Image (spheres, helix red, strand yellow):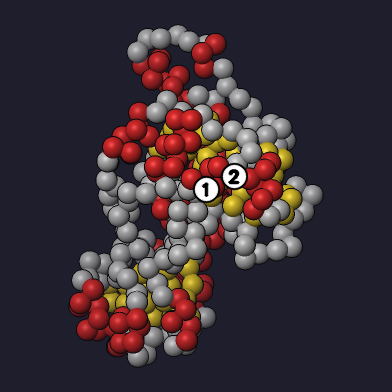
Amino acid sequence: MKILITDNVDNLLIELLENNSFKLKRAFDIERSDALNIIENFDGLIVRNRLEIDDEFLQKAKKLKFIARYGSGMELIDTSLAKKLGICCFNSAEGNSKSVAEHALGLLLGILKNTKKSMFEMKNKIWNREGNRGNELSKKTVGIIGYGNTGSKFAHILKMFDCKIIAYDKYKSGFGDKFVEEVDLDKIHQLSDIISFHIPLNNETRYFFNSNFLNRMSKKFYLINTSRGRIVRNSDLIEGLESGKILGAGLDVHETENKNFSKVEFNSQMNFLLDHENVILTPHIAGITFESKINLSTILFKKIQKFK
């Protein structure tokens, strides 16, 4: 079986595939036009978030049996058309879900405890204990939007914090248990002290957080986003911060990132968020750990092996 790899992946995945007699073409920097010219020769395709796998691409992939996404997001793959053409699409989202969940918790604790503000005051030799009195996660209601791999892992981590966990997922049901209450979106808006996004980016979820979402929230709240940048509209986030409706935000993903996450535009809105004392921004690193590199490779390999 011949597999085209269009993006950089960990060497472990390469070794696992080659040791099991898969024939690989490593083309980590291949241009789209060149990929279109050769894709008809391959049975499998391994991608990340660089090339768009659209109608034109899929129609040329005459032999393709699968598209394997190293990581989680599938937004650049026309999965509906691929399914019609008999091409199986899958990812290795399980591989870094724990990493993302831990990062979401870190962002949340950071904004609850005034970590950013107090650190910069310390750098300026300001000793301000009372002015940095924080909030406990205990007894707060955390509203999780999206209960897939990362959302469920985040809920699992939160269990030890004595907080109330509610979760909404448009496409899943029956996942509630003694720790997590399955609710509709109205309950999320009504009850949440904290909102955490764990949803893919698609036409339904783009700018899921907007002024309408903000206005429907009953309480002042904290916002966490470790999913995709364009889930949250920055202008509406800033509106919430300025009005005091949003008490703080932790963002690992950003509206102004490019499609393959290699850079971000630092425009006036991003600069506002960078300067805000209770907004913590990180450079899309939630899923990037030394452990997740191994997990992503081994999980994807096991899924690919089924096509041999």
Structural crowding at the residue carrying mark 2, measured as other residues with C-alpha within 10 Å and reported as few (<14), some (14–19) or many (≥20):
few
Q: Label 2: which residue?
A: 216
Residue type marked 2: Arg
Q: Label 1: which residue?
A: 212
- In this view, the residue farthest toward the right is 178
Position of 131 relative to 109 (above/below): above
Residue for point 30% across, 82% down: 56
- In this view, the residue farthest toward the bottom is 62
Residue for point 41% across, 66% down: 75
Element at label 1? helix
Between 257 and 245, the one nearer to me in the picture: 245
Q: Could you tell me residue 39's position as x and y percent?
A: 29, 83
Q: On the picture, is 112 further left or further right than 201?
A: right
Between 287 and 301, the one nearer to me in the picture: 287
Q: Are marks 2 and 1 in contact (CB under 8 Å)?
A: yes
- Where does the N terminus fall, quadrant-wise? bottom left
Residue for point 50% across, 24% down: 114
Question: Between marks 2 and 1, how big is the CA–CA gap?
Answer: 6 Å
Residue for point 48% across, 68% down: 91
Residue type marked 1: Asn
